[in-house]
Image: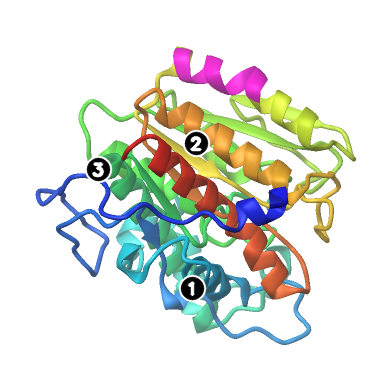
Amino acid sequence: MSCIKQIFSIKPRINVGAAFASCRRFHAELVRHESSGLPIVHHSKYVCELSPTHRFPMGKFPRVLHFLIKDQVITEKQVWVPEIASKDLLSCVHTEDYLNNFINGTINEQEQRRTGFPWSEGIVRRCRYETGGTVLAAEVALQRGMACSTAGGTHHAFPSYGSGFCLLNDLAVAAKYLMGISSPKRKVLIVDLDVHQGDGTAFIFKEEPCVFTFSVHCGKNFPLRKQQSDLDVSVEDGLEDKEFLSTVEAHLPCLLETFRPDLVLYDAGVDPHWEDELGRLRLTDQGLYQRDLYVMKTVVSRGVPVAAVIGGGYSRDIDKLALRHSIVHRAATQVWRECGM
Ligand SMILES: [Zn+2]
């Protein structure tokens, strides 16, 4: 069996884990009282209408779930459905003016151009569900050790404006929300391996000692003007699997030992892939799989929960792209199984 086939043939373990009937789930419409495998967070409203010529591959979100079920990586019983993120929840990161303009459609044209999307009610709803999904994935990961959404990773959104296809910063909202409901504050490590720097997230947490932002990105890629993460590793164009993995290996264990997070939020963007339309690196499917496996194994083996989001990925071939995004769920399934969760 080829390596690629191995990636796409991981099956779930049956009846894993113990029941967590006492879980407090603030953002789930659906409450599950028994463990049914790796929690996958998904909402049918992660997607909205866009013009067919728009370059953002909106159709990928439902297809990620489709392939996970079709390939028997997961069953429908593993799917957790998030609630829409309330304005109140979003205000822990975003300014009131921005939220009012964003929700009510009074964003001016220049601001819309910066986001890459024409404003619509659908896009607002989609982004709010996506953010609710990341918050739920983080909550469930704290209870069960791991969870993966089928969207999320909108790391270019700043408190008062959207940018680069990112309108709400789901990672920042999830981190702030979890810090806000615990005392003492939980510590969150954000591991952002999308090909683009997580500039919005870095900006939001630059003065926050309880959140550590770690970004590995292609230096010549968007955004032109980088922010300062707690740890930035800027890599050159054309980087391949082995070098990318050694870059992550050189930093992640040390960060886990020194920062000692209570939770890791993992942005598993697939845009470092060699075929990606916006990436400039040379990772393969196998390289992405090894990267995701390494990150989640390294985190979970230290007893730290991890919530993963899919991050960026750009291709006109939606099914090929959705399969690529499903690599993180396949790797997570292997970690879930091997770690006996
Ligand atoms: Zn990206």
Q: CA distance from mark 1 to mark 2?
A: 27 Å
**Residue that numbered label 1 is attached to:** 126
Closest to the observer, 200 or 215:
215
Q: Image height check: is 299 above or below 12? A: above
Label whose residue precedes the other's in the sequence (1 or 2): 1
**Residue that numbered label 3 is attached to:** 143
Residue pictured at 11% horizontal, 52% vertical: 21
State the extent of the magenta-drawn residues as a range.
249-257
Amino acid tagged 3: Gln
Q: Residues within 10 Å of mark 3 (few under 14, many from 20)?
A: some
Label whose residue precedes the other's in the sequence (1 or 3): 1
Residue 89 in the image: state x and y as whole percent.
33, 56
Q: CA distance from mark 3 to mark 2?
A: 16 Å
Amino acid tagged 2: Met
Find residue 184 and report its image quarter.
top left
Residue 18 in the image: state x and y as whole percent.
18, 45
Circle 1: element type: helix
Q: Image height check: is 205 above or below 246? A: below
- Mark 1 vs mark 2: in front: 2
